[in-house]
Amino acid sequence: MGPVPSADPRWRPRLSVPAGLRARYGLSAAQALEAWPLLYQREPELYELLVEGEPLHPRLFRELPLDGARVLEVGAGTGRLTLPAAARAAEVYALEPVAAMREVLRRKLEERGVTNVTLLDGRAEAVPLGDQSVDLAISASAFGADPEHGGEDGLRELLRVTRRPGEVIVLWPDDPNWFMGHGFTHVAFEGELEVRFRDLATAYRCAGIFYSPAVADHFRRTRRPVIPFAALGVNVARDLCRLQIE
């Protein structure tokens, strides 16, 4: 169905844009990298359907020192990490550059009566907070080595806004070796995970846009909206990189 994942928790598949997503926006191969930004801007609800089916390992949440903390979340998206963080933290600053994504998250917070989250428009390279203003900076698969996702400039900003002592923790990091080269510790937890969509209709829809035809065939054959991460050729969301700042 996709690349065969390695047993090494630092393994990552080669970056590519799903053919179905590229076709959805009528993009040529040369324009492929525009597909994900277009999804975020035009169809944040579709993005939400995708990520709500992709679980993060439960140990990842338990590793976050959220209780009573002031927290910066980078790349909040539609709130996969924001909501569980807000349940434990004193205050969460949810940084998200895409207005459509922030609006989905704003509605979620309003519907749930969450009042300790402040939505911020911005990117990791220019965080609109003062020096040493948070106890913890976190991100779930949004901040990474690529300059488009933060890179060196973004890391400097996260270090600037985080108090001493404090921590920067990235869940499901894009390039663990890059983070380790910058002083982070890489931690991975045992156990396989399944992608579990809300229903078969959603599973078929997401398979057709984000995965290969073999994934849709799996759903048709099993008649269940569930598939192992390994069958997708995707690294399991079971690791993090953390940097303690003294």
Image (cartoon, grey):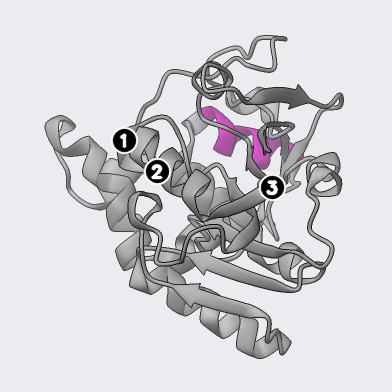
- Label 3 or label 1, whichever lies nearer to me, is 3
In the shown orientation, is residue 130 left or right of residue 236? Answer: left
For badge 1, the amino acid type reads Pro
User: Which residue is located at x 51 percent, y 29 percent?
Assistant: 174
Quarter of the figure that contains the N terminus: top right
Distance (Cα) linking label 1 and label 2: 8 Å
Is residue 234 found left or right of 198 in the rendered image? left
The reply to whether the C-beta atoms of the residues labelled 3 and 1 are less than 8 Å apart is: no
Disc nearer the start of the sequence (2/3): 2
Percent of width and height locating residue 28: 14, 36
Give the residue number, with chain letter if any, for mark 1. Answer: 147
Other residues around mark 3 within 10 Å, as few (<14) / some (14–19) / many (≥20): some
Q: Is residue 6 above or below residue 70?
A: above
Task: Name the front one of labels 2 and 3.
Answer: 3
Q: Earlier in the sequence, mark 1 or mark 2?
A: 1
Residue that appears at 35% across and 65% down: 98
Identify the residue under disc 3: 166
For the residues labelled 1 and 2, say whether their Cβ atoms are less than 8 Å apart: yes
Categorize mark 2 by other alpha carbons within 10 Å: few (<14), some (14-19), many (20+): many
Q: Residue at x 72, y 85 (%)?
A: 112
Q: Which residue is mark 2?
A: 154
Q: Is residue 154 above or below residue 129?
A: above
Element at badge 1? helix
Q: Nearer the viewer, residue 82 or 32?
A: 82
Is residue 91 or residue 1 the one in the foreground?
Answer: 91
Image height check: is 108 above or below 223? below
Residue 215 inside the magenta-drawn segment: yes
Q: Which mark is residue 135?
A: none
Query: Badge 1: how crowded within 10 Å, few (<14), some, or many (20+)?
Result: few
